[in-house]
Image (cartoon, rainbow, N blue to C red):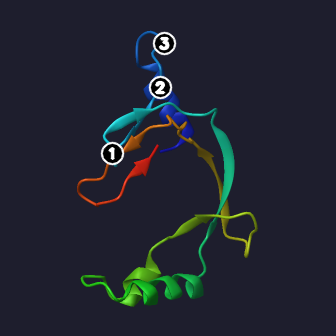
């Protein structure tokens, strides 16, 4: 979603309600830190192929050629090529709670 579209949606809401992020992993809402801009970089084909080869152990993955055609972006501190863009990053605030995993058998601190 583009920033102007988000602003338009927020301005259509009456009043001044709190803005929260829904965390679907734990089924709860979280506050957000002040939005900040960040640069993301397009993952190189070589790096994507390495990820694909690591994930090939699973079943039901598309063919390698299809995965390489997809746009994959990553948040890194350095830029490896000219393919980067700026995004607005909404980071959830930690609530200091724990969700006891029943499906995945692992707890999630959030």
Q: Is residue 110 above or below residue 76?
A: above
Q: Secondary structure at mark 1?
A: loop
Residue furthest to the top in view is 15
From the viewer's perspective, is residue 84 above or below residue 27? Answer: below
Q: Residue at x 45, y 87 (%)?
A: 54
- CB contact under 8 Å: marks 2 and 3: no
Describe the element under mark 2 as helix, strand or loop: loop
Q: Could you say whether the residue bearing mark 3 is in a helix, strand or loop?
A: loop
Nearest the camera: 65 or 60?
60
Residue carrying label 1: 24
Is 79 placed left or right of 95 in the picture? Answer: right
User: What residue is pinned by disc 2?
Assistant: 19
- In percent of width and height, residue 45 lies at 56, 84
Image vertical order of residue 62 relative to residue 20, above or below: below
Mark 1 or 2, nearer chain start: 2
Q: Residues within 10 Å of mark 2 (few under 14, many from 20)?
A: few
Q: Position of residue 15 (x, y in %)?
A: 44, 9
> Which of the two marks, 1 or 2, is nearer to us in this view?
1
Q: Position of residue 91 (x, y in %)?
A: 57, 42
Disc 2 versus disc 3: distance between alpha carbons? 9 Å
The residue beneath circle 3 is: 16
Q: Which mark is residue 98?
A: none
């Amino acid at each position: 979603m583009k920033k102007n579209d988000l602003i338009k949606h927020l301005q259509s809401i009456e009043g001044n309600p709190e803005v929260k992020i829904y965390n679907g992993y734990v089924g709860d809402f979280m506050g957000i830190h002040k939005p900040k801009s960040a640069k993301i970089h397009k993952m190189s084909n070589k790096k994507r192929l390495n990820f694909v080869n690591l994930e090939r152990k699973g079943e039901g993955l598309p063919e390698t050629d299809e995965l390489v055609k997809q746009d994959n972006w990553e948040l890194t501190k350095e830029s490896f090529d000219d393919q980067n863009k700026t995004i607005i990053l909404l980071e959830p605030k930690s609530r200091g709670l724990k969700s006891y995993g029943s499906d995945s058998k692992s707890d999630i601190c959030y």
